[in-house]
Image (tube, grey):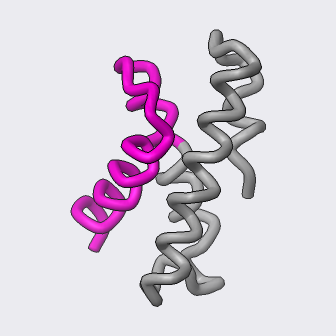
Amino acid sequence: MSIVPLLAQSAFDPEFIETLVSAYEDAWRKVEQSGSAFASPRYRRAAQEIVAKRIIEMAQRGEREATQLAEDAVSYLARSYA
């Protein structure tokens, strides 16, 4: 899954969309490297969607730093769905 389809109707400018894509890729890499069950084929798609939507939500709230967006999304996934 990619975050890009979820951004199709967004009001973010193209440059910031690149930041969101980078944050998503970083967050998902962290999930995979953690060995979490969320990275398993059984949960991957749902977990990727949760991460993507959380990044978009936080960006809409004003967060602009890719690192913060990624860390928040990983933390949110672990705390909300573990």
Above or below for 38 versus 45: below
State the image quarter where residue 46 is shown.
bottom right
Q: What stretch is highlighted in magenta?
A: 53-82
Q: In this view, does 4 lie to the left or right of 28?
A: right
Question: Picture coordinates of residue 11 (x, y %)?
Answer: 64, 10
The dominant secondary structure in magenta is helix
Q: In this view, does 10 lie to the left or right of 28?
A: right
Specify whether residue 30 is painted magenta. no
Front-most of residues 1 and 21: 21
Question: Picture coordinates of residue 75 (x, y %)?
Answer: 30, 59
Question: Picture coordinates of residue 81 (x, y %)?
Answer: 31, 66
Q: What residue is shown at x 77% (from left), y 37% (from top)? A: 5
Above or below for 45 versus 57: below
Question: Picture coordinates of residue 2 (x, y %)?
Answer: 74, 51
Quadrant in which the C terminus is drawn: bottom left
Above or below for 24 versus 47: above
Residue most toward the left?
79
Count of numbered circles in the view: 0
Specify whether residue 62 is painted magenta. yes
Q: What residue is shown at x 40% (from left), y 51% (from top)? A: 73
Q: What residue is shown at x 73% (from left), y 58% (from top)? A: 1
Front-most of residues 77 and 29: 29
Above or below for 72 versus 55: below
State the image quarter where residue 34 is shown.
bottom left
Q: Is residue 32 left or right of residue 12?
A: left
State the image quarter where residue 79 is shown.
bottom left
Q: What residue is shown at x 51% (from left), y 32% (from top)? A: 56
